[in-house]
Amino acid sequence: MHSLYETDFYAWTQEQAKLLRKCQWSQLDLPNLIEEIESLGKQERQEVRNRLSILLGHLLKWQYQPQQRSPRWLSTIRVQRRDTQRLIQENPSLKPYLQEAFQEAYQNGRDLAVGETDLPLKTFPQNCLYSLEEILDSRFYPGEPSPEIENDL
């Protein structure tokens, strides 16, 4: 027989919350509850990697295609920086994970830049030329100066 966890996940979550509120510990679906709590932590780590990937991809595009710079690229860079910083503020235990995520995210960002610029992969350095501190710094924009940011800083 299938459990509610397998047939209606939303209903299962509501039931588990109700049991927790009523302190009905023996009725909890502990194996699945533990798995879901662990999964939530993994999602936060994935969110950090995703944000950094998008940020790095746009910084690479910014540097290697200066003629294509746009307000849209600028806003994407700003949003990804703020959202990454907010994630770390809300989850300070993820801060030590940032450097690892940064390394993984660079390869994803590089692929993103290739896909969105049609430039060959070899255009972009195999290893990131920016530091973690730089990419999160609201004043850092690689490459030549740009009127898009000079007016805003």
Image (cartoon, grey):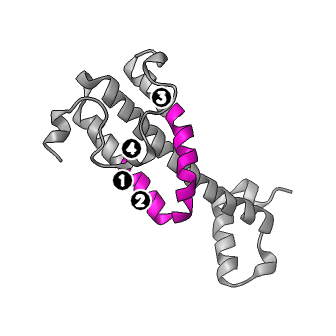
**Label drawn at residue 110:** 3
Along the line of sight, which residue is nearer the eye, 136 or 84?
Answer: 136
Q: Earlier in the sequence, mark 3 or mark 4?
A: 3
Please, what is the three-letter code of the amino acid marked with disc 3? Arg
Question: Foreground residue, 16 or 89?
Answer: 89
Please name the residue that numbered disc 4 is placed on. 135
Task: Report the disc number at residue 82.
Answer: 1
Residue depicted at x 26% and y 25%: 66
User: CB of mark 1 within 8 Å of CB of mark 3?
Assistant: no
Between circles 4 and 2, the one closer to the viewer is 4
**Marks 1 and 3, the one that precedes in the sequence:** 1
**Which residue is under mark 2?**
86
Tell me whether the residue at label 1 lies in contact with that at label 2, contact meaning CB atoms closer than 8 angstroms. Answer: yes
Q: Which residues are magenta?
A: 81-107
Gap between marks 2 and 3 measured at Cα = 24 Å
- What's the CA distance linking mark 1 and mark 2? 6 Å
Left or right relative to 40: residue 111: left
- Residue 80 seen anywhere in this rendered image of the structure: no
